[in-house]
Image: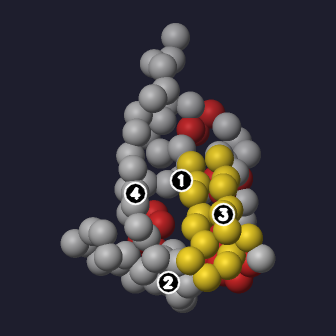
Amino acid sequence: SVDLVHSSHVLEHLDGLAELMRELRRILKPGGRMVTLVPHFSNPYYYSDYTHRRQFGLYSFSYLARDPLFRRQVPLYDGDTGFVLVDVRLGFKAAPPM
């Protein structure tokens, strides 16, 4: 159906992440991509937002997709979502709290 799914600071607010990932994979065309931004758990503002349901770290999406990128292999606790990691970037851009 679609070539690209883009989400920015949404997934940390949702329950049922593995089910959502499977549904997103279902609606993507073959060769389609998902690009997502989530806050790292070390962000000083992360724990202030009571609407955050989960934290994300470097390997979080490795638990939700086949991961040829990292040497550290982790289990797919919720089964295969159909995704394969092609890039993971860790950026720290938040200004220090005042």
**Image coordinates for residue 96, horizontal then vertical, percent:** 45, 18
User: Could you tell me how far apart the alpha carbons at marks 2 and 4 are, in whole angstroms?
Assistant: 20 Å
User: Could you tell me how far apart the alpha carbons at marks 2 and 3 are, in whole angstroms?
Assistant: 25 Å
**Image coordinates for residue 21, horizontal then vertical, percent:** 65, 74
Q: Residue furthest left?
A: 71
What number is the disc on residue 55?
1
Residue 69 seen in the figure: yes
User: Could you tell me how far apart the alpha carbons at marks 4 and 3 are, in whole angstroms?
Assistant: 17 Å
Circle 2: element type: loop
For marks 1 and 3 on the same chain, the one whose residue lies earlier in the sequence = 3
Q: For the residues carrying marks 4 and 3, which lies nearer the camera in this image? A: 3
- What amino acid type is highlighted by mark number 3? Leu
Residue that carries the numbered disc 2 in the rendered image = 77
**Residue 59 figure quarter:** bottom left
- What amino acid type is highlighted by mark number 1? Gln
Above or below residue 30? Residue 53 is: above
For marks 2 and 4 on the same chain, the one whose residue lies earlier in the sequence = 2
User: Could you tell me how far apart the alpha carbons at marks 2 and 1 are, in whole angstroms?
Assistant: 16 Å
Please report the residue visible at 65 percent of the width from the left and 47 percent of the height from the top.
Answer: 8
What number is the disc on residue 88?
4
For marks 2 and 3 on the same chain, the one whose residue lies earlier in the sequence = 3
- What amino acid type is highlighted by mark number 4? Val
For marks 4 and 3 on the same chain, the one whose residue lies earlier in the sequence = 3
Categorize mark 4 by other alpha carbons within 10 Å: few (<14), some (14-19), many (20+).
some
Circle 1: element type: loop
- What amino acid type is highlighted by mark number 2? Tyr
**Camera-side residue of 97 and 27:** 27
Circle 4: element type: loop
For marks 2 and 1 on the same chain, the one whose residue lies earlier in the sequence = 1
User: Could you tell me how far apart the alpha carbons at marks 4 and 1 are, in whole angstroms?
Assistant: 16 Å
For marks 4 and 1 on the same chain, the one whose residue lies earlier in the sequence = 1
